[in-house]
Amino acid sequence: MTANPTSKAEILRRIRAANHTTPTSDEAQTAWETLPRNYNRAGTLQPEALLQLFEDRLRDYDATVTRTTRQDLARAVALQLNARNKNRIVIPPGTPTEWLPQGFSFVADQALTPTQLDAFGGVLTSATLAIAETGTVVLQAPSQGRRALSLVPDYHLCIVHADDIVETVPQAFHRLQPTAHLATTFTSGPSATADIEMTRIKGVHGPRILDVLLIV
């Protein structure tokens, strides 16, 4: 236990203590290492099939996917923003200028308040990686900005590189290990919930609209 345990760790510590089952560090490490891991941990799809699966999953979630190239990315961004009638877009600090087409207002996030973020037409970010099997894009700070940046605006335009797509969730977590300490957001399609009266509502926990530009 660290000097400043997280709330979750502290809750689990108290539960174990109450049940008289608090393991030592060595016991906890041994238990972790001996957990059965018989699930699929590696992908088997060829590159094109992997991209197809990723695109199919996103479209199932009511997101859009458009393939583009590095050279044509700025044009693809412009086309997508025009199609959505979006002009004023917030971006993470350090976003490459070559991604940003002329004729739009791109504003770098500098600790903007939730109210200020909500006033933008949308947000443009890249992705740390993506998971084909679940149609998930993974965002991490600071590369993709703080979490509020991709959760408050109603529209999210996300740039995903084909080389950053893995097939399975275990592959994703393996690749994320070196940056596991960073704030991480997993997004599978536009935000939606059907918790209330089984009626599907979009935009409850994040953007109502998600467009993905896939760089191949």
Image (cartoon, rainbow, N blue to C red):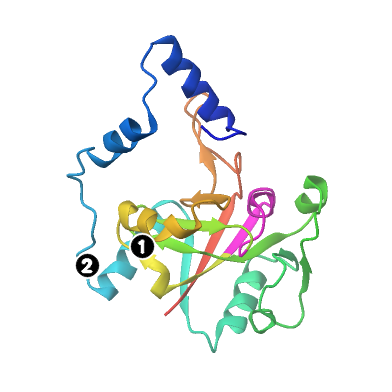
Q: How many marks?
A: 2
Which of 204 and 31 lies nearest the eye of the viewer? 31
Q: Amino acid at mark 1?
A: Phe
Q: Which residue is mark 2?
A: 45
Range of residues picked out in magenta: 143-157
Q: Is residue 206 above or below residue 211?
A: above
In the displayed structure, does residue 1 sit left or right of residue 20? right
**C-alpha separation, residue under disc 1 versus residue under disc 2:** 11 Å
Classify residue 140 by image quadrant.
Answer: bottom right
Residue 89 in picture, x, y percent from top left? 73, 65
Label 1: few (<14), some or many (≥20) within 10 Å? many
Q: Label 1: which residue? A: 54
Q: Name which residue lies at 34% across and 69% down.
A: 51
Residue 66 part of the magenta segment: no
Q: Residue at x 54, y 63 (%)?
A: 211
Regarding mark 1 in the picture, which secondary structure is present there?
helix
Q: Is residue 156 magenta?
A: yes
**Res 134 label:** none
Q: Amino acid type of disc 2? A: Leu
Residue 77 left/right relative to 166: right
Earlier in the chain: of badge 1 and badge 2, it is 2
Where residue 139 appears, as percent x and y from the top left, is 54, 57
Query: Residue 167, position in %: x, y?
Result: 30, 61
- The reply to whether the C-beta atoms of the residues labelled 1 and 2 are less than 8 Å apart is no
Q: Which quadrant does the C terminus fall into? A: bottom left
Q: On screen, 148 above or below 95?
A: above
In front: label 1 or label 2: 2
Say few, some or many: other residues with alpha carbon within 10 Å of mark 2 (under 14 / 14 to 19 / 20 or more): few
